[in-house]
Amino acid sequence: MEYREVEPTREFVCGLSHGADWRGELETLATEETLDAAFFVALGAVQDATIFFYDQDRQEYDAVEFDEPFEVASCVGNIATLEGEPFAHTHAVLSRPDGTAIAGHLDAGTVFAGEAWVRAFEEPLVREHDAVTDLDLWSLDAT
């Protein structure tokens, strides 16, 4: 395991804009506030969603698009730098009116209503290619 201590610096509460892209709103906050590292939790509703699932054998993401409204029952993630730009690594559990749910990496979703809490850190988090998983993961120094 690799790890390092991080120092929290700022916290934000956010109302996501109706009609905007869910993940894009978090990345816009990161750009406007120069956040190189943060964690967030969020909830609300989306009008549609694109969920990614990472196939570990093929080492590729499969996208599934849903053109239906969902409650965002839970959304967690982090903000780090990927290829010099803010990237919001976003996972969500989305529920339908009958209570069934889908979950995974939320690549996109049109905001109906959304609220987020974001906690920023002083030390930057940078994503770099990991040869074992073929994913872009945090580059951390072991402590």
Image (spheres, grey):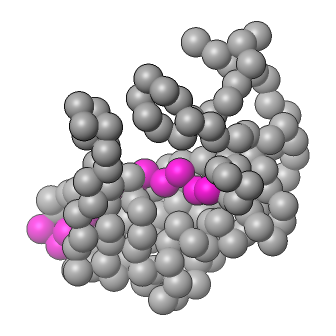
From this view, report whether residue 119 is shown above or below residue 99.
above
Please state the horizontal and vertical placement of residue 101, each as a whole percent of the image. 20, 57
Please state the horizontal and vertical placement of residue 66, each as a whole percent of the image. 22, 73
Please state the horizontal and vertical placement of residue 111, each as a whole percent of the image. 46, 80
From this view, report whether residue 67 is shown above or below residue 79.
below
| Residue stretch rendered in magenta on the structure | 87-98
Q: In the shown orientation, is residue 132 left or right of residue 69? A: right
From this view, report whether residue 82 is shown above or below residue 127.
below
Q: In the shown orientation, is residue 138 left or right of residue 31? A: left
Q: Residue at x 67, y 52 (%)?
A: 83
Residue at the outermost front position: 131
Q: Residue at x 32, y 55 (%)?
A: 52
Which quarter of the rendered picture does the N terminus lie within? top right
Please state the horizontal and vertical placement of residue 34, each as a whole percent of the image. 84, 61
Q: Nearer the viewer, residue 9 or 30?
A: 30
Q: Nearer the viewer, residue 87 or 11?
A: 87
Q: Is residue 76 magenta?
A: no
Which quarter of the rendered picture does the C terminus lie within? top right
Q: Main secondary structure of the magenta part?
A: strand
